[in-house]
Image (tube, helix red, strand yellow):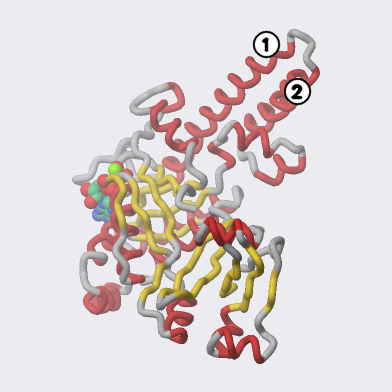
């Protein structure tokens, strides 16, 4: 699942890079596992999960491998990006490739850090970015429509149907805000996905607040009422402080958080929300002293899950022995779970559930 990615977008100086740095280190801090940076713009971030520790403690595993989310810092969005301003086209190409979006919005005051739009106004900023993405989508659908019309000229029925569908999609994308439900109802979601429409990608907003509580609360209220109408979740973080905190050791960080009255969960929430946005659930494996959390898309079959661990597991799949982690915790081990009738024997098409602890049997 290493290929699923969350793109971090936002205006320059909104705090994207700061957030990515904080996330990368925070993930490592929470799970005490080294993060890997593939390139400076990409952070592979551990997903904090207390279930992993609980299972590993009980099973006596020394090694714990959490699930990860890959975040990509996508710089270069400015007003006019859809017309190729700034890094516009390059930016838009990168963001089309991600599976979900974290939109960082600046809500911190800092006279020395310039603001591209002049003044602090999170709702205006979020709308500006939103508009660029929308314009770019409209252009994208327009181009696809032109091509479909050309193809349809020959009288080809499929191309004609495609052109008709694109006309409907164009209408829908033109009226903000588009949502997945509308698209699904009108059977246009597949086409929207093919186009990589930005306005349809699962999105959360991270409001990057400063230290002044009063103005933070005000901005938060404004952003929330904007986002609510669009079904976009809002999370609040102070990226700069989080980045500084992530350089301290765990005890120091806790102390500092208490003093500052900071919500220690803010980064974990961003990571978890991103994970869920990607449509991922977690199953666990225990093997030779290693307990591992595996991300799979919701609705995955047991055979697919097996293949995550090893291609041999998928090819030679015989059965999956599964126990929900709560039952695993109450029984203490696989053998006890089997005795108490908690261990389920599942076949190839078993739909893996979030929190399953699974042992695969396979033949070579
Ligand atoms: N005061 C304050 N400064 C911040 C905060 N977040 C980021 N910055 C600073 O703002 C500048 C731009 O941040 P950066 O992460 O590079 O923004 P990007 O352009 O969106 O990647 C840097 O100097 C950061 O240290 C914050 O929450 N509070
Ligand atoms: Mg940056």
Indicate the secondary structure of the residue bearing disc 1: helix
In the image, what residue occupies the spot 56% across and 39% down?
199
The percent position of residue 220, horizontal first and vertical second, equals 44, 57
Q: Is mark 1 within 8 Å of ligand 2?
A: no
Instruction: Name the side, left or right, on which 189 lies relative to 3.
Output: right
The image position of residue 179, as x and y in percent, is: 65, 43
Res 192 seen here: yes
For the residue pair 43 and 292, the one nearer the viewer reads as 292
Q: Which mark is residue 150?
A: 1
Distance between the alpha carbons at the discs numbered 1 and 2: 13 Å
Q: Is residue 110 visible?
A: no
Find residue 314 and report its horizontal and vertical position in percent: 59, 58
Residue for point 67% across, 37% down: 190
Instruction: Single out the residue that lies furthest toward the left.
Output: 112
Left or right: where 158 falls relative to 207: right
Q: Quadrant of the C terminus?
A: bottom right
- Identify residue for label 2: 164
- The residue closer to the viewer here, 101 or 315, is 315
**Secondary structure at numbered mark 2:** helix
Q: Residue at x 69, y 62 (%)?
A: 348
Nearer the N terminus, badge 1 or badge 2? 1
Nearer mark to the viewer, of 1 and 2: 1
């Amino acid at each position: 699942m290493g290929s699923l990615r969350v793109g971090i977008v936002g205006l320059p100086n909104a705090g994207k890079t700061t957030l990515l740095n904080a996330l990368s280190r925070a993930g490592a801090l929470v799970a005490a596992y080294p993060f890997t940076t593939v390139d400076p713009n990409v952070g592979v971030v551990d997903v904090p999960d207390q279930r992993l520790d609980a299972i590993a403690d009980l099973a006596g595993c020394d090694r714990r491998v959490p699930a990860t989310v890959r975040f990509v810092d996508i710089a270069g969005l400015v007003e006019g990006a859809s017309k190729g301003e700034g890094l516009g086209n390059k930016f838009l190409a990168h963001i089309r490739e991600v599976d979900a979006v974290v939109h960082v919005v600046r809500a911190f005051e800092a006279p020395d850090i310039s603001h591209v739009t002049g003044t602090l106004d999170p709702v205006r900023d979020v709308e500006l970015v939103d508009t660029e993405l929308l314009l770019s989508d409209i252009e994208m659908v327009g181009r696809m429509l032109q091509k479909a019309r050309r193809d349809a000229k020959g009288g080809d029925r499929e191309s004609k149907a495609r052109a008709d569908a694109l006309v409907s999609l164009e209408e829908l994308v033109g009226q903000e805000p588009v949502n997945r439900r509308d698209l699904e109802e009108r059977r246009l979601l597949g086409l929207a996905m093919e186009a990589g429409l930005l306005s349809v990608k699962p999105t959360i907003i991270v409001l990057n607040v400063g230290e002044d509580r009063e103005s933070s609360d005000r901005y938060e209220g404004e952003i929330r009422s904007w986002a609510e109408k669009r079904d976009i979740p809002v999370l609040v973080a102070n990226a700069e402080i989080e980045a500084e905190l992530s350089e301290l050791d765990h005890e120091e960080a806790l102390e500092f958080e208490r003093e500052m009255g900071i919500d220690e969960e803010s980064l974990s929430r961003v990571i978890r929300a991103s994970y869920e946005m990607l449509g991922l659930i977690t199953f666990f494996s225990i093997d030779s002293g290693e307990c591992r959390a595996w991300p799979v898309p919701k609705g995955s079959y047991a055979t697919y899950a097996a293949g995550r661990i090893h291609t041999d597991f998928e090819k030679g799949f015989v059965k999956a022995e599964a126990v929900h982690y709560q039952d695993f915790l109450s029984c203490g081990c696989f053998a006890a779970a089997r005795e108490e009738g908690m261990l389920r024997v599942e076949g190839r098409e078993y739909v893996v559930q979030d929190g399953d602890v699974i042992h695969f049997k396979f033949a070579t």
